[in-house]
Amino acid sequence: MQDIPRREFIVKGSAVLAGLAAFQLASRAYGFPSRPGEEVVPWSDTLPPNPVPEVIKNQLVWSDLDSWITPNEQFFSIAHFDRPVIDPATWSLDITGLVGRPMTLSLDDIKQRPRQEVVFTVECSGNDGLPFFNGGIGNATWAGTPLAPILEEAGILEDGIEVVFWGADQGDVSIRDITFKQNFARSMSLADAMNPNNILCYEMNGEPLPADNGAPLRLIAPGWYGIANIKWLNRMEVLDRRFQGLFMARDYVTLREEQRDGETVWMETSVGPALLKSAPARITRVGTDYRILGAAWGAPIERVEVRVDDGDWIEAVIDDSEEAEFAWKIWSLDWPDPASGSHAVTSRAIDTSGNIQPAMDDPLMTKKVTFWETNGQVTRNVVIG
Ligand SMILES: Nc1nc2c(c(=O)[nH]1)N[C@H]1C(S)=C(S)[C@@H](COP(=O)(O)O)O[C@H]1N2
Ligand SMILES: [Mo]
């Protein structure tokens, strides 16, 4: 009895779906603002050689940006210690410390739990803070299982306030004259860890998480700088106090000179959530019709403005064909018949609260003396004609 309507529904449904798929394909192809026959005009500025090729690998080449999602083989990776290659069959995740029910989960256990995906643009907080580093960023679809229900099942004891995430990678760490072998670790307050957006991630753009990006399991903490997204995760430990490991309390510490009632104070904070930012990615041309294209991320984007040389700020067109809270927005601005010669191209993002991405000579940038969290406006140079 119910078969007939159901089949009808499926037939109609699939026709609708097929139509929708075709439409989405078309709008997707249209969505990334590329034009038939366009050619890429290279930037005239180039990065000096990367002095730490084992730490920073595979930087994004901005002028190659031609898709909203960064393919895995073009995704950057950062490793401060070694780069462990882990056998998923023998790997497990321990949940220990101040929990009522300590747990050990296999990869299968984790994959059997509810699946959650998020499109999230990960940027290293060191990006644009060092002369050889502007490609520490990429946008991927990450899949895994939500973190919060696992912590709930483990039963955080009353005194638990902090969750430490440990990686399998190890290096030598020193405090004063003591040197010891330590695993990579970062922590979050219990409140931050319980954010429903956080996932324990085993898949990147539909493929198993690549080794360099943390296989078999990593934390994905949407909205945070890269450092919070612990790779090669194998232990989570709940503490009754703040964790002060190298990457929380000594490295990845932003030092800012600030004024309080005319007095200079030095503020030291651990790198945290991402900051509002944008960058020009590439220039293309069809004949003499030039176009500037870029990305904006780190906060809900209201608009992006572009300036050529010392000209006015002009509003760019934001590509709204892809909607994802934690993903970059691609923007573009037509630049018809530019004068020949050298030009500087700068972008600035404005968020929905009205905050403007700071200029590089803004005190927010100049009074920040460590290189992390450099979210100032990025200027690129191009020679026309
Ligand atoms: N275990 C571990 N996790 C880590 C790191 C690391 O060195 N070890 N580097 C962090 C830093 S600094 C960044 S920017 C991101 C980069 O993620 P990706 O390598 O997948 O691009 O991973 C973070 N997670
Ligand atoms: Mo980073």
Image (cartoon, grey):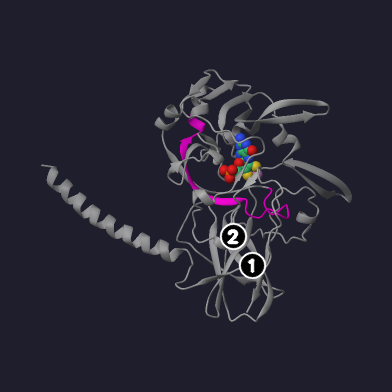
- In this view, 379 is above or below 57: below
In the picture provided, is 267 more to the left or to the right than 193?
A: right
Label located before the other in sequence (1 or 2): 1
User: Is residue 87 rendered magenta in the image?
Assistant: no
In percent of width and height, residue 350 lies at 62, 61
Residue drawn at (66%, 23%) of the image: 240
Task: Tell me the residue at 55%/41% (across/down).
Answer: 213
Query: Where in the figure is residue 345, as x and y percent of width and height?
Result: 66, 69
Instruction: State the image coordinates of residue 36 (x, y, percent, origin top left).
Output: 44, 72
Residue in front for this viewpoint, 111 or 174: 174
| Front position in the image: 215 or 114 | 215
- Crowd class of label 1 (few under 14; some 14 to 19; many from 20; radius 10 Å): some
Q: Is residue 244 visible?
A: no
Q: Secondary structure at mark 2?
A: helix
Q: Which amino acid type is marked by label 1?
A: Trp
**On the image, numbered disc 1 is attached to which residue?**
43
The amino acid type found where label 2 is placed reads Trp
Q: Which residue is situated farthest in the left direction here? A: 1
Left or right, 116 with respect to 59, comes to: left
Residue placed most toward the observer, 224 or 88: 88
Q: Is residue 328 above or below residue 193?
A: below
> What range is drawn magenta here?
126-149
Badge 2 is on which residue?
62
Q: Residue at image x 63%, y 61%?
A: 279
Q: Which corner quadrant holds the C terminus?
A: bottom right
Residue at x 10%, y 42% (from the top left corner): 1
Please provide percent x and percent y for residue 26: 37, 64
**Labels 1 and 2 touching (C-beta < 8 A):** yes
